[in-house]
Image (spheres, coloured by chain):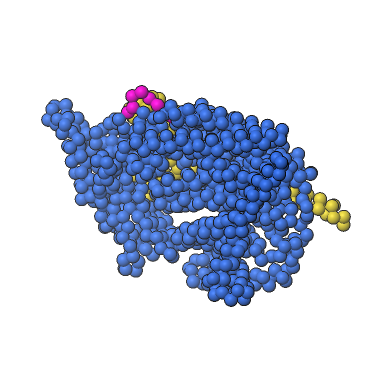
Amino acid sequence: MDPARKRRIRLVVALTAALLLAGALAYTSFSASSSAVTPSQLLASADANRSYQLTGKVVNGSIERRADGITFRVRDRAGTASVPVSYSGAIPDPFRDGREVIINVKKTGTTFVGEKDSLTTKCPSKFNEKQSQPGGQPS
Amino acid sequence: MAVVGQACLIIALGLCAYGATASVLGARSGRDGLVLSGRRALYALAAVVTIAFVIMEAAFWRSDFSYTVVAQHSSTTTPWYYRLAAAWSSQEGSLLLWLWLLSVWSTVAFVLLRGRLRDVAPYAAAVLLGLGAFFSALLLFTASPFATVASAPAEGMGLNPLLRHPSMMSHPVMLYSGYTLFSIPFAFAIGALIVRRVDAEWIRATRFFTLGAWLALGFGIILGARWAYAELGWGGYWAWDPVENASLLPWLTGTAFLHSVMIQERRGMLKVWNASLILATGVLCILGTFLVRSGILDSIHAFVQEGNTIAWSFTALICVMIAGAVWLVTTRRHDALRSDARIDAFLSRESMFLANNLVFVGLAFVVFWGTFFPLISEAVTGEKAAVGPPWFDRYTVPLALLLVLLSGIGPVIAWRRSSASRLWRSIRGPAISALVVTALVLVVVPGATGHLLSMLLVLFAVFAIGVAVQELWRGTRARQAMTQDNAVQALGGLITRNRRRYGGYLVHIGISVLFIGVALSAAFEGTRDVRLTPGTSATVKGYTFTYEKPTGRIAQRAGELERIELGSVVRVTKDGEQVATLRPSRGYYPMPGIQAGVLGRYFEGESTSEIGLRGGVVRDLWVAEQPDITALQKKVERADALFVQLVRSGRIQMTQAAEVRDLTLQRFVSDYAASAPSAQFRILVSPMVFWIWVGAAIVFLGGIIAIWPAPGSVRGRVRARYAARVARDLGRA
């Protein structure tokens, strides 16, 4: 076979394989992903067997410790709608009232059960956001 | 001094604009004076940015809270070494660190490469100065570290306690060094493409910086892994966090580049590929900085909120970089980037390098896709969604397996053409050794048969180690035969004479050891989250962890309370024999201000886990604790109310308030230690984690050997510089 033709065939085969693999990767990422939702979106509609990535803030005073983990409520970043979450697994150090959290949950009855070790707490805003009065007395 | 700092930034921007323009104009018109002037602008940039950086660090050092950035990220109770590191916990300091490292590394590069690549260098200088202009402008217009207020607060907000770890002093600096060092081969690649001089010279000239970038970035990534393991109270070293992933991306493409350039140097092939790889690496370095500074993706590292102007600036820069890179490569692919040769056979070193490159790029693509999936998903479906660690593992584990296998075959397969029988003869010993070792692991370790992928990884890693050791052994024997040296001298001589090759083999050994650690710790780790009261126990993987007693202490710094530590003594036994005594604790840092109460502020601030760890060659025993302070908090609330009452009624004078507060806190801590509070424990028994750090250490040793200039190369550089000077003088004559 003409070497140039042979090289072209090889290239087409390699590119097709790469495209197929990339397609498989893209397809599985969509099917394996968890929708990022807010508490109010979950309250509006949540399927029982679907995994969601819940983002919001921990409601003040809602954290309760149990023998096998914790329960708490997550509310919208700017709002009051909240959902109950029960969770067991690693609890990040910055986790506490008012903190912004990300957690993978599934609906079980009236509560949302967190996936083990999926709780992430974002770095507290006290250390990050610009203060409204820069340089003023820290509050 | 803030004015001087701000002036330095203005001068820096001016120098960048002038230097880039002079370099390009000089190169296009052939006016050497302008080119030299452009290069001197780069040196001057390093000088002024160093002054600016020192001014900022000095402000942190002396806790000058008139600087907004110092007031928001440091405090007098922050230890001096963390005060200096607090600079880059801020947006402003972080960007200034980037600019400073860029200017310093660029200057080092241009001093070392003086006289080489004279046609390429001006364009490279323009690219580096262009990047410098971007960061100078950001610092000037959006995030100035020299913003001040007239009335300085008495105390700052302090460094986030999570960042108070020795890695804070080195991890960000190493990552940024990696990013900025990669800018040098990136800039020279652009220069080489512009002047269509894409032989291997620019690769050879910048190899030191490419290897340095690879080492620094790798070191930074490992430091981050160690930090996560020791600090976050979670017990893992890798979580596929977007910001971790962002630092891994350029490391992966950079590693691919380090391999594939060997083919270009030897056979003049893969020029398009190599140019594309280093351009992609440069863009990914900016992307990594962008991710950590923009907060565009949800991450524990997302230090800033979404929607800031910095995000848009970075997006624009990345778009320009991608468009420029694509244009350069596509317009030069048919002439300057045409290969001098083609791959002769599937079984050849060239093919293995190419396969290794495809796997690295495949890994980078997987990590990129998973990291940016929330944005991709939102763009495609209108709904933000994320993929988790299982998705990443599904693709990265098989690719890692393939990579380790190729790292075993690559060093022994012949260039141009080999055959299956010749290849088998070369790998027979290591392959049989690997099979024997893996069979032993399967027999000795209970449950090993249930972890097929981990066992395959062990098999391939032992094989790769065997191949590297075999090559070192063969080389040593051959050298002994020639020189009559003893084995140690011969090995030393062998490595010294070909540092790049044998340093590379050490890197292969280190990576394989690291993978063995990852495979076995992931497969056989035992984890348990349990609530215990003093005297009760939990058993994990045959080890019994007994919560013996609570502990409490007040840590002071500079006469001020730094944190309250509540913890425990945990005794670990196995088969009735004591193995270790661990002391996990949680440090509570005071909240600024007194909104949470005069006493309550000491329990309502940030808190961090100090793990109890007994590391070992075979297994780590790891415990993190979250004390239950509910009862203590109620006491604190009551005491706060009483404290206010007593101060208002005059029964406590203001002059006595601090003393009463300290005595009360001391009492609380003593009461806690004397009581029997329950606590939540996370217990890990992790085998072979030690080997992850050992593997990393071997990788860096190999990297340093590979990067260390051979005596011949120093002489060569001096000769090249001398030759360049003679040529210049002759040109003037």
Q: Position of residue B306 (x, y in %)?
A: 50, 31
Which chain is rendered blue in the image?
B
Q: Residue at x 60, y 30 (%)?
A: B18
B148 drawn magenta: yes
Which chain is rendered yellow in the image?
A
Q: Position of residue B718 (x, y in %)?
A: 61, 52
Judge from the rendering whether residue B482 lies leftward or rightward of residue B579; answer left or right: right
Judge from the rendering whether residue B438 lies leftward or rightward of residue A6; answer left or right: left
The answer to which quarter of the image holds residue B494 is bottom right
The answer to which quarter of the image holds residue A119 is top left
B77 drawn magenta: no
Q: Residue furthest right?
A: A2
Q: Residue at x 33, y 24 (%)?
A: B151
| Prevailing SS of the magenta stretch | loop
Q: Residue at x 29, y 53 (%)?
A: B568
State whether residue B628 is above or below residue B713: above
Looking at the figure, which quarter contains the C terminus of chain B? top right
State whether residue B408 is above or below residue B320: below
Depth check: A80 or B216 in front?
B216
**Range of residues picked out in magenta:** B146-153
Looking at the figure, which quarter contains the N terminus of chain B? top left
